[in-house]
Amino acid sequence: MMPTPLTFLIVHGAYGHPEGNWFPWLKQALQAYGNVVIPQFPTPEGQNLDAWRAIAHRALAKSVPHETVLIGHSSGAIFVLRLAEETPQPFKAVFPVCPFARDLGNATFDPLNATFYTPAPDWKAIKRGAEKIIGFAGDNDPYVPLSTSRAVTDALDAELIVIEKGGHLNAESGYRALPLLLKEIRNIVGMP
């Protein structure tokens, strides 16, 4: 019997899109191992947890949680954690990149992101919803302070990989590829 192919869901952040940052690079790198889905989520108009959840559920309709890896950047990071919070079976792994679970003091982004962390996440449920969680953050992120990302991973008893001078780990910070993330994904799913 053939093993179930892996599914990888990559989630962009506010004002983001599937062709931004390191998403196309990661998609290409992962395609040999399974189905890679990078939906366009509504942003900034229509950005809210319910709208994004509906899109993610459609994208994952044919996947099996224990063979599914979730990767989210910025707003997408807290979003994939919310998916783990509500799953009846744990996902294989969740990778929140530049995660946060509170207002960031940014008048542009806070109203867009509020539904993702209000009400507060149930950290125990999130931990149950993923076999492994590894976070990533830049030590000089101009949007998400390192202490904020660390608070998320600490609440989850999860590892946080800090990238020196990584900024927001986006194209604006020079990231069109994120090799450390790919390395961790490969390690967890047993890829060569």
Image: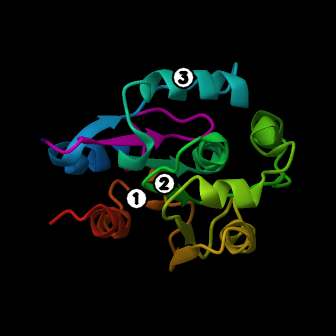
User: Which region is colored magenta?
Assistant: 2-22
Going by the numbered disc 2, the residue's amino acid type is Asn
Determine if residue 47 is in view: no
Residue type, mark 1 in image:
Tyr
Q: Taking 118 as reference, is 146 above or below it? A: below
Tag 2 residue: 170
Residue 48: say if magenta.
Answer: no
Image height of 64 relative to 179, above or below: above
Residue at 19 percent across and 45 percent down: it is 3
Q: Residue drawn 65% across and 75% down?
A: 157
Q: Which residue is mark 3?
A: 55
The disc at residue 175 is 1
- Dot 3 or dot 2, earlier in sequence: 3
**Nearer the camera: disc 3 or disc 1:** 3
Q: Are marks 1 and 2 in contact (CB under 8 Å)?
A: yes
Q: Earlier in the sequence, mark 3 or mark 1?
A: 3
